[in-house]
Amino acid sequence: MTSLFKNILRASVIVPAIAICAPAFAADTWQVKADDSDIKFAGTQLGADFEGAFDKFTAEIVFSPDDLAGSKVSVLIDIASVDTENADRDSQIISADWFDVAQWPTAKFETKSFREVGPGQYEALADLTIRDVTKEVALPFKLEIEGNEADAEGTLVIKRTDFGVGQGQWSDTSQVGDEVTIRIDIDATR
């Protein structure tokens, strides 16, 4: 065999073997920095704007811009940790007419897919479950990754009545608005 033919034959065996053994991109696991992360919301009551936050939540994040198909996020929100800086409103929010924390203590956000919509901008298609009602939502978010640090910020608008939040007299949206804006700001470490 000629030296050229041997090299071609060797390359035809080695190159496919390298391709088979080469690692594929894999999504990275991230740990949320709880003290630097927020899940906030805004709504209206009697025509006046108000804001609040959920102080306790857990998140399992596996994400990589290079492996959107392998990326997954699951967030569990402790509804009783609500803080609107108004004790009366907070006690109403956790009551049976609103979130009914005694029966459904958590809300869940679980992604189904991701897509890139621009440089550093993504959209997560997810199931949001509140009061045992699940609706598909789309969360657009900006993501900055520097080394092993990441910051994601996004905003989502939902209708509370779609999830049964506000029963009886509170299903009337004239006193408490139907639209609720949810804002996330998540800092995480790889």
Image (cartoon, rainbow, N blue to C red):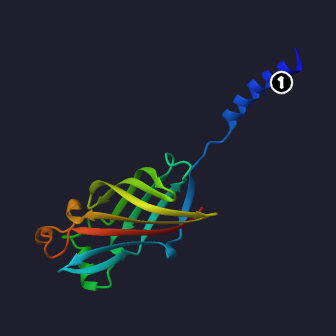
* Quadrant, the C terminus: bottom right
The quarter of the rendered structure image containing the N terminus is top right
Residue beneath the point at 41% across and 53% down: 111
Asked if residue 10 is positioned above or below residue 131 in the image, the reply reads above
Residue 100 appearing in the image: no
Query: Is residue 11 visible in the rendered structure shown here?
Result: yes
Quadrant in the picture for residue 134: bottom left
Residue 83, position as x, y percentages in the image = 34, 79
Q: Is residue 8 above or below residue 87?
A: above
Q: Secondary structure at mark 1?
A: helix
Q: Amino acid at mark 1?
A: Asn
Q: Which residue is mark 1?
A: 7
**Residue 15: quarter of image:** top right
Residue 165 rendering spot, x and y as whole percentages? 22, 66
Q: Is residue 184 above or below residue 7?
A: below
Please tell me whether residue 164 is drawn above or below residue 52 in the rendered image.
Answer: above
